[in-house]
Image (cartoon, rainbow, N blue to C red):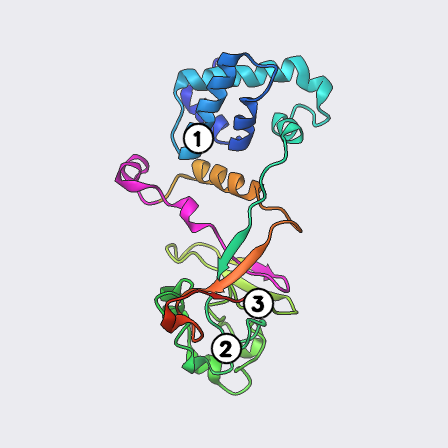
């Protein structure tokens, strides 16, 4: 049964964009098919939808590879994505810079010692400062038994410091928090364990469309899920455990270099 355009779009957005790029160097393909794979990968990376004709051709390439050589060259039972990944050459390693909100207790997994005096975490150049500004409660954080306490202690009740994304960067103990969706109040809370010496971060720019043309095309400021997830997979492909280097920093909202309008390297 011939696939519809919608079927093919759903299929192609389930692929790893880098895998499609890698097909363009497959020596078993004709020059024309390698060119088609390359052009489709470029469109997917930029968030564009390939034409129906392009998708039919790409699906034919995948089916042909699977039937001719995948069975004998791959041990993953027809998983072409896994096969292409094992054959792919080494890729450049990506290093990361992660922004933090200022903390007066060394980001050690505890509430600030003097929360009411910390104006930097809610400064314009902090990390999600508007959300921290709306959600933090200095009175709770400053009450006896809470100032400087573990950030997920029962002493805080249902309250959790809104800067928890970066609060445990240098903390030696695990923490536990609950995520909510700030634009969907009825969305179920998500339990999030935060291991020692860890930060919650996200490549925000990958989710935003580029310019007014894409905003009209996709009906808003964000890419649809199928495009966004491919962009994330491509980003994560270059981040390697034990090889990528992570730098943490504070933007201008910090008491050390803020007046000079300089970033502060924290780790």
Of labels 2 and 3, earlier in sequence is 2
Q: Are marks 1 and 2 in contact (CB under 8 Å)?
A: no
> How far apart, in angstroms, are the residues tagged by discs 2 and 3?
13 Å
Q: Position of residue 39 (x, y in %)?
A: 44, 23
Secondary structure type for disc 2 = loop
Residue, disc 1: 44
Asked if the stretch drawn in magenta spans residue 220, the answer is yes
Q: Which residues are magenta?
A: 192-221
* Closest to the observer, 147 or 3: 147
Q: Left of 58 or right of it: where is 182?
A: left
Q: Residue at x 45, y 24 (%)?
A: 40
Q: Residue 227: tell me if it is visible.
A: yes
Q: Residue at x 59, y 20 (%)?
A: 26
* Closest to the observer, 68 or 219: 68
Q: Residue at x 62, y 27 (%)?
A: 84
Asked if the stretch drawn in magenta spans residue 141, the answer is no
Marker disc for residue 168 = 3
Secondary structure type for disc 3 = loop
Q: Position of residue 151 (x, y in %)?
A: 55, 73
Q: Left of 192 or right of it: where is 163?
A: left
Query: How many numbered discs?
Result: 3
> How far apart, in angstroms, are the residues tagged by discs 3 and 1?
36 Å
Residue, disc 2: 104
Image quarter (top left, top right, bottom left or bottom right) of the C terminus: bottom right
Q: Are marks 3 and 1 in contact (CB under 8 Å)?
A: no
Label 1 crowd bin: few (<14), some (14–19), many (20+), radius 10 Å: many
> How far apart, in angstroms, are the residues tagged by discs 1 and 2?
44 Å
Label 2 crowd bin: few (<14), some (14–19), many (20+), radius 10 Å: some
Of labels 1 and 2, earlier in sequence is 1
């Amino acid at each position: 049964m011939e696939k519809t355009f919608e079927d093919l779009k759903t299929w192609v957005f389930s692929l790893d964009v880098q895998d499609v790029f890698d097909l363009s160097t497959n020596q078993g393909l004709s020059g024309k098919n390698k060119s088609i794979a390359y052009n489709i990968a470029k469109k997917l990376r930029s968030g564009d939808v390939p034409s129906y004709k392009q998708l039919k051709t790409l699906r034919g390439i995948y089916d042909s590879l699977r039937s001719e050589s995948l069975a004998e060259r791959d041990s993953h039972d027809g998983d072409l994505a896994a096969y292409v990944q094992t054959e792919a050459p080494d890729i450049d390693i990506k290093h990361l810079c992660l922004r933090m909100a200022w903390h007066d207790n060394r980001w050690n997994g505890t509430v600030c010692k003097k929360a009411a005096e910390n104006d930097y975490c809610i400064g314009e150049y902090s990390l999600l400062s508007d959300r921290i500004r709306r959600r933090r409660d200095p009175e709770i954080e400053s009450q006896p038994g809470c100032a400087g306490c573990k950030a997920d202690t029962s002493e805080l009740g249902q309250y959790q410091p809104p800067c928890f994304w970066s609060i445990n960067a240098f903390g030696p103990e695990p923490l536990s928090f609950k995520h909510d969706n700030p634009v969907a109040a009825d969305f179920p809370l998500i339990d999030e364990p935060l291991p020692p010496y860890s930060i919650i971060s996200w490549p925000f720019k990958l989710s935003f469309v580029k310019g007014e043309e894409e905003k009209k095309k996709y009906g808003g400021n964000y890419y649809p899920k199928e495009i966004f997830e491919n962009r994330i997979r491509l980003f994560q492909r270059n981040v390697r455990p034990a090889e990528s280097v992570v730098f943490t920093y504070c933007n201008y909202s910090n008491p050390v270099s803020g007046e000079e309008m300089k970033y502060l390297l924290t780790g």
